[in-house]
Image (tube, helix red, strand yellow):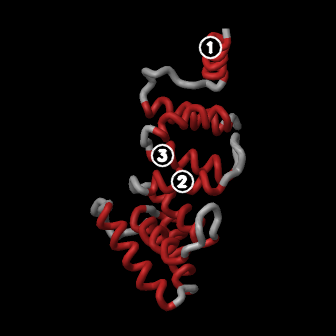
């Protein structure tokens, strides 16, 4: 009896949360979560994005980080947010890198680490454009101003290691 109740409960919760069928494309599933989010259904967005994020979908990972950082539809938890941002950043997601930079700068959910914060901000600045490029560049400059003598060299080494592990695609140097 208990197993049948649990199975029925999970089916009802899936439908109530607007979960996608297993055959839905990742794009459709992500967009369904985005629609739910924009309509204020943050829990519905979480349900739509969780499976994608766990499967390695960088945009869904970034979005999960946002939900946890802001406490939208889930309890606010900076450590969980940082974990999701780190997963997306490892795949080259510029906004996730910038968020990690700010979190490491402040010690929000992660250890305060100015060298790592700088490396993430500088790397984000290589990916983002327009206003977001300016935000990343400003963050990197602000962080570097507060460096202790040993942090500048460590930041340089961290950035080189990040580039070695995941080279960024070649881009134009023109910023909009």
Residue drawn at point x = 48 percent, y = 46 percent: 59
* Residue 59 numbered mark, or none: 3
Give the SS element for disc 3.
helix
Q: Which mark is residue 90?
A: none
Residue 134 is situated, as x and y percent measured from the top left of the image, at 51, 70
Q: Which residue is mark 1?
A: 3
Picture quarter with the C terminus: bottom left
Nearer the N terminus, badge 1 or badge 2?
1
In screen coordinates, is 45 left or right of 85? right
Residue reaching furthest bottom? 149
Element class at badge 2: helix
- Mark 3: few/some/many CA within 10 Å (<14, 14-19, 20+): many
Residue 88 in the image, given as x and y percentages of width and height: 46, 52
Which residue is the site of mark 2?
Answer: 83
Question: Total number of numbered labels?
Answer: 3
Gap between marks 1 and 2 measured at Cα: 33 Å
Q: Secondary structure at mark 1?
A: helix
Task: Find the distance from the CA under tag 3 to the CA under tag 2.
Answer: 14 Å
Q: Nearer the viewer, mark 3 or mark 1?
A: 1
Q: Which quadrant of the view contains residue 46?
A: top right
Left or right relative to 143: residue 167: left
CA neighbours of label 1 inside 10 A, class few (<14), some (14 to 19), many (20+): few
Give the vertical position of 119 relative to 75 (above or below): below
Q: Vertically, is 141 above or below 60? A: below
In the image, 119: left or right of 111? left
Disc 3 to disc 2: CB gap under 8 Å: no
Write the residue at 39% across / 67% down.
126
Q: Nearer the viewer, residue 134 or 110?
A: 110
91, above or below 127, in the image:
above
State the CA–CA distance, disc 3 to disc 1: 35 Å
Q: Position of residue 2 (x, y in %)?
A: 67, 13
Assess disc 2: are there few (<14), some (14-19) or many (≥20) residues with their C-alpha within 10 Å of its C-alpha.
some
């Amino acid at each position: 009896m208990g197993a049948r109740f649990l199975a029925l409960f999970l089916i009802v919760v899936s439908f109530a949360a607007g979960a996608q069928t297993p055959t839905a494309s990742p794009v459709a599933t992500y967009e369904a979560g985005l629609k739910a989010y924009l309509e204020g259904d943050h829990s519905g967005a979480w349900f739509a994005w969780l499976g994608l994020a766990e499967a390695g979908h960088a945009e869904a990972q970034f979005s999960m980080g946002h939900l946890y950082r802001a406490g939208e539809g889930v309890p606010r938890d900076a450590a969980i947010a940082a974990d999701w941002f780190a997963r997306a950043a490892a795949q080259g997601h510029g906004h996730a890198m910038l968020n990690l930079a700010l979190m490491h700068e402040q010690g929000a959910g992660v250890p305060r680490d100015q060298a790592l914060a700088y490396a993430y901000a500088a790397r984000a600045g290589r990916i983002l454009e327009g206003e977001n490029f300016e935000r990343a560049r400003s963050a990197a400059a602000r962080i570097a101003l507060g460096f202790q003598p040993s942090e500048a060299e460590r930041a340089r080494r961290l950035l080189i290691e990040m580039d070695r592990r995941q080279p960024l695609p070649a881009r134009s140097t023109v910023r909009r």
